[in-house]
Amino acid sequence: MGEFLTRAISVVAAVVCLNGYNTVLGKREQAKEQIRKQQAELEQSANAAKEGTITDGAYKDGTYTGEAQGFGGPVDVEVIVENGMISEINITSAEKEDGAYLSRAEDIIPTILEAQSAEVDTISGATFSSTGIKEAVAQALEEAANQED
């Protein structure tokens, strides 16, 4: 009787373990499928952005300005929005900025253009100057987002 009870408990334990394992596998497969769908959507959006087929961006078309504090003083930028997307960013004034820092900080501009947002990381080695550019762009984009048709 003791041997039968031991075997029965072992069989029940094995069945419970297999059932738990199958549950975990099912959830993992659902997560993988969801990731595949999101990746496909992201690729589709990225391709549309590269091809210029997106026409309903978050911003109203126009030229907007912003100003923020950089390393050495105020940084003024001009942001051009076309088809609802940021198409160009120009630094219009940064007179008191150190040339070396400003030159490095300008590397943030392509990152902002690619992200279509000022919510990007600053440039290492030119943190304050790149923060000035980033915040000035954010200010200009606030204006672009708040424009009414």
Image (tube, rainbow, N blue to C red):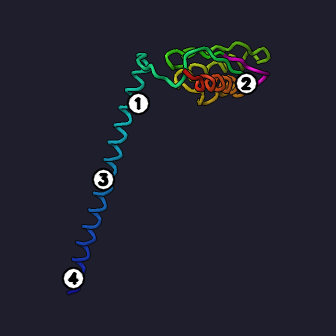
The residue pinned by badge 1 equals 42
Q: Residue at x 58, y 14 (%)?
A: 62
Task: Give the residue type that dot 2 points to.
Answer: Ala
The residue pinned by badge 3 equals 25
- Is residue 74 rendered magenta in the image? yes
Spatial distance from mark 2 to mark 3, Cα to Cα? 51 Å
Task: Give the residue type that dot 3 points to.
Answer: Leu
Query: Does residue 31 sit above or below 129 in this rendering?
Result: below
The residue pinned by badge 4 equals 3
Q: Secondary structure at mark 4?
A: helix
Query: Does residue 25 sit above or below 68 in this rendering?
Result: below
The residue pinned by badge 2 equals 68
Q: Residue at x 61, y 17 (%)?
A: 79
Q: In terms of image quadrants, where is residue 51?
A: top left
Q: Secondary structure at mark 3?
A: helix
Whether residues under marks 1 and 2 lie with C-beta atoms below 8 angstroms apart, the answer is no
Which mark sits nearer the N-terminus, 2 or 4?
4
Which mark sits nearer the N-terminus, 3 or 1?
3
